[in-house]
Image (tube, rainbow, N blue to C red):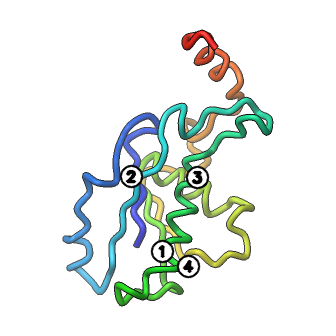
């Protein structure tokens, strides 16, 4: 079970979640991960110079790691489930629908709590104005 934290796209950490209670409730391995947040995770110029969604790439890299290593923890790579809460649910939903993971078999199921990719706060439809403001504030 890969838990994707979801306080915000700007702050948070997988390290603060203790999965031992959930793991002991059933025969589960609970994994949390960290991913880039804020401008490091989502800055986009809407072109190839800064395409954005780096947080999603980090989560996909985590899923690849799980596929390569979960057997060492007596886990089954064919039974990986994404679990996201809030912003983490939106990210899990975005990963699940991304063409980057199509035909990769990185996970089998998904649990979304209190958010989806369709939530009004889940995506920024026009990120370029935000990127320009960041660049101006940093004198770039």
Q: Which residue is drawn at 65% across and 23% down?
A: 131
Choose top left, top right, bottom left or bottom right for residue 45: top right
Q: Give the CA separation, mark 1 to mark 3.
A: 15 Å
Residue 116 on image: x %, y %:
54, 51
Where residue 66 is drawn, which disc sits there? 1
Q: Is residue 112 above or below residue 135?
A: below
Disc 3 and disc 4 in contact, CB within 8 angstroms: no
Where residue 108 is drawn, which disc sits there? 4
Residue sitting nearer the eye, 48 or 131: 48
In the displayed structure, does residue 58 sit left or right of residue 10?
right
Residue 26 on image: x %, y %:
27, 83
Q: Give the CA separation, mark 1 to mark 2.
A: 17 Å
Disc 1 and disc 3 in contact, CB within 8 angstroms: no
* Residue behind mark 3: 56
Quadrant where the N terminus sits is bottom left
Which of pointers 2 and 4 lies earlier in the amino acid sequence?
Answer: 2
Q: Give the CA separation, mark 3 to mark 2.
A: 13 Å
Q: Nearer the viewer, mark 1 or mark 2?
A: 1
Q: Which residue is drawn at 49% across and 33% down?
A: 38
Q: Residue at x 71, y 24 (%)?
A: 128
């Amino acid at each position: 079970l890969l838990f994707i934290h979801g306080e915000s796209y700007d702050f948070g950490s997988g390290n603060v979640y203790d999965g031992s209670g959930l793991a002991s409730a059933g025969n589960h391995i609970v994994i949390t991960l960290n991913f880039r947040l804020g401008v490091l995770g989502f800055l986009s110029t809407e072109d190839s110079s800064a395409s954005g969604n780096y947080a999603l790439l980090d989560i996909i890299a985590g899923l690849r790691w799980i596929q390569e290593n979960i057997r060492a923890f007596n886990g089954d790579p064919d039974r990986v489930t994404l679990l996201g809460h809030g912003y983490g649910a939106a990210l899990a939903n975005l990963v699940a629908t991304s063409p980057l993971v199509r035909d990769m078999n990185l996970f089998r199921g998904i649990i979304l709590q209190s958010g989806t990719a369709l939530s009004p706060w889940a995506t920024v439809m026009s990120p370029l104005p935000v990127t320009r403001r960041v660049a101006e504030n940093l004198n770039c």
